[in-house]
Amino acid sequence: MNYKIKDSGKRQEYPTGAVRDTSEDKIRWDLLPVEALKRVAIHYTNGAKKYAPNNWKRGIPTDRFIESAMRHFMQWRLGERDEDHLSAVVFNIFGIIYNEEKENMPEWFKKELEEKLKQEVEPKQEPAYIRLRKNCSQD
């Protein structure tokens, strides 16, 4: 890869004498609420344990994401607190956004993504030494 450093032509100088490009017109990732993201990350972690990492990227239709988002929102709105329904809403909304973005991905990237997902989702056999240890500990 031959990456280039983007340059807006604008500079910010610091009291130390250091200079760098300004952050003007750049995505402000620092504005995302870390506390909320943690809850959503926990939801993704639990889903990865239940199904497989990134299982949802293998192709869930948008209408299924909408149905689930609405159901979880109503469960939260009605006061149900048996699970983190708001994180489930965000998960489903992110799925809708992902589906929209995937439509605009170049074909080569889609193929690369599908290959990676196959490797992630396919069950992996434990190394032999772990299987042996488990067998020995059962005696």
Image (tube, helix red, strand yellow):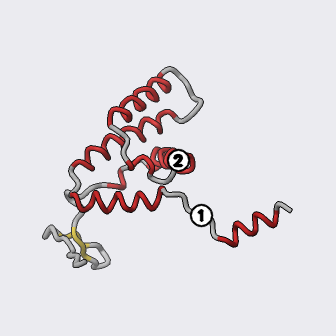
Residue appearing at x 23%, y 54% in the figure: 105
Mark with earlier residue (2, 1):
2
Left or right: residue 85 versus residue 61 is right
Given residues 92 and 28, the one toward you in this image is 92
Left or right: residue 35 versus residue 18 is right
Give me the disc on residue 87.
none
Given residues 139 and 39, the one toward you in this image is 139
Residue appearing at x 32%, y 37% in the figure: 62
Residue position for label 2: 51
Residue appearing at x 19%, y 70% in the figure: 6
Given residues 124 and 52, the one toward you in this image is 124
Q: Position of residue 2 (x, y in %)?
A: 22, 79
> In what element is the residue under mark 2?
loop
Q: Which residue occupies the extreme right position in the image?
A: 139
Relative vertical location of residue 87 with respect to residue 127 in this rendering, above or below: above
Left or right: residue 132 versus residue 114 is right
Q: Position of residue 33 (x, y in %)?
A: 42, 47
Q: Position of residue 29 (x, y in %)?
A: 34, 55
Mark 1 surroundings: few (<14), some (14-19) or many (≥20) residues within 10 A: few
Q: Position of residue 134 (x, y in %)?
A: 75, 64
> In what element is the residue under mark 1?
loop
Relative vertical location of residue 9 with respect to residue 99 in this rendering, above or below: below
Residue position for label 1: 125
Give the amino acid at mark 1. Answer: Gln
Given residues 108 and 101, the one toward you in this image is 108
Quadrant for the C terminus in the image? bottom right
Relative vertical location of residue 90 with respect to residue 28 in this rendering, above or below: above
2 vs 1, front mark: 1
Q: Are marks 2 and 1 in contact (CB under 8 Å)?
A: no
Quadrant for the N terminus in the image? bottom left
**Mark 2 to mark 1: distance in Å?**
16 Å
Residue appearing at x 59%, y 30% in the figure: 82
